[in-house]
Image (cartoon, helix red, strand yellow):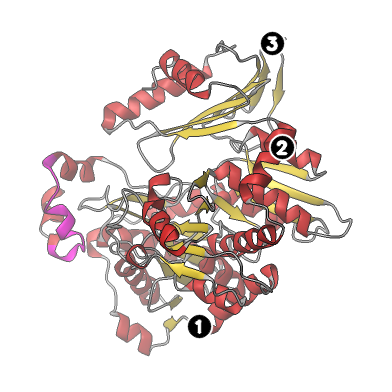
Amino acid sequence: MRAQWEQRISESLVEQFHNVQTEEEIEAGFTDVLSFGTAGIRSTFGIGPGRLNKFTIQKFALGLTKYLRNITNEPKVLIHFDTRHLSQEFANEIAKVLGTNGIEVILPETFKSTPELSFAVRNLKTTAGIMITASHNPKNYNGIKVYGPDGGQLLTEPSLELSRYIDTVEDPLNIQTDDLETLQERGLILPFKEETTKAYKDAVKELVGSFETSQTKTVLTSLHGTSLPLLSDVLEDLSYRNYVVEEAQSKPNGDFPTVNIANPEAEDTFDLGKQLAEQEQAQLILATDPDADRIGVVERYEDGSTRYFNGNEIGLLLMYLRNQQLSGDQHKYIIKSVVTSALSEKLAQSLELGVINVLTGFKYISEQLKNLEDNASQLVLAYEESHGYLVDDFSRDKDAIQTAALLIKYKEELAQENKTLKGVLDNIYQEHGHYKDKTLSPTFEGAEGREKIKQIMNDFKQLETIDIEHLTALFIENYITKESLNVKTGKTQTIHLPETDLIKFIFEEGFIAVRPSGTEPKMKLYFSLDVENLDGVIEEFEGKFNLK
């Protein structure tokens, strides 16, 4: 099999990546399985059925064709792509397969963001949307996310069904397609009209409202991704022009040359933004990831000092400030993941907001939004701790564009009262407890690493109690068995959420949660605790369960 693939390297689109790979990396392309999971497809480039290349992309597209034909006689698909390596090429290959099989495709000429796709799927009433992105993963990754007509990512059952159709494609090396020009002439590949982008910008404008003052100066950086010029256009429409762009870091570039990793969760991605803020005497720095679904925030003060806000803290600020902004006596609520800060529920309860908990993955938030479409309740915020937020559901995935515009507006309103975001957050901590939140992602590479992750999770699932110094254990929640164990009484209760590989330890002081990553050879460890020495707790936990 490998020989057949190697004969086609020049056609694979990934020859430049293949040529610098080790023999072990190349072989992994034939031993690993590239599957469409509940988070879509995400992988590195290379030849073979286990890596992203022209042929595995075409296999996905042919499977998608079969899936769509099973849903409707006349499917219509919207494709967007980010600034990563091969994103546009992969988008073109998918469009060619779909078009050759008689499916109408809307394809833009240039990169677009994830929130634009989510909005446009609903606006254009397409059967599905496809986003070519690996979000904030390293530069040698790319991926595919599939969206339903509601603008949310496919849920578990549709994802499994699509995966089964993809698996029926037996010979990915010999999928025939017409060229783009022919399909465009036949009206099967259509241009993406800018009036749809205008409709998205208008929706953000309606949410945020025009700026009456612009005392706050903001530094914007796209981390070489898709948020600019879209975000700057939105701000201009809102009559806010007191911003500067970190130009070197905002040129589209799949190598992400100015950062270690294009992820606003990493504080060092703000280094250039902080330098520019110092030069410009700016008070706010906003960074978005490559597909503009996640956002990071740094506030700068008169003395030149700065404050970086983690994903949980941004969520607390948005919840509090958005709730202040909303008037009326209708029921208001938030949606959050089960690994979001323990403080989020305490704050929501104090604000008399309903709380809907969902599993990790924004598609579960999208599902709740769809279920609540006819409900008179008011969404205040939907979010995950990993810097993904949605305030208005005109898009149904994480939306850094609407979030950025709102944060600037809130910062401006606070500035008029000589207040800061940090001051608001400090008041929340003072009233409800200074919870410390930290997410760790230990890496376990290769087949040995996969086995270690599996063994660690199995060990956690056997626990009937947990003993960590300075913490008082209350419950162990096993989301595989969907049981919550009271460690004091030994009694169990059912968890009314879908099954997933997650263990959550509930303490009087907060929680610790563990799960394997769905897209990388890593584990995710979540700590949210009202303790003096969080690092000490982490060190004890890692040592006790062999997580270093």
Measuring from the top left, give residue 118's x and y in whole percent.
55, 65
- In the image, residue 42 lies at what x, y percent? 37, 50
Q: Are marks 3 and 2 in contact (CB under 8 Å)?
A: no
Residue type marked 3: Gly
Q: Residue 357, image x and y in percent?
A: 68, 40
Q: Is residue 18 magenta?
A: yes
Sequence-first disc among 1 and 2: 1
Q: Which residue is mark 3?
A: 490
Residue lying at 63% horizontally and 77% vertically, measured from the top left: 202
Q: Position of residue 468 (x, y in %)?
A: 55, 13
Q: Which residues are magenta?
A: 10-23
Q: Which residue is mark 2?
A: 345
Residue beneath label 1, please? 194
Q: Relative to residue 389, is residue 298 drawn left or right?
A: left
> Mark 2 packing: few (<14 Cα in 10 Å), some, or many (20+)?
some
Q: Residue at horizontal 68%, vertical 20%?
A: 508
| Helix, strand or loop status at disc 2 | helix
Q: CA distance from mark 1 to mark 2?
A: 40 Å
Magenta stretch: residue 511 in it? no
What's the amino acid at mark 2?
A: Glu
Q: Nearer the viewer, residue 52 or 84?
A: 84
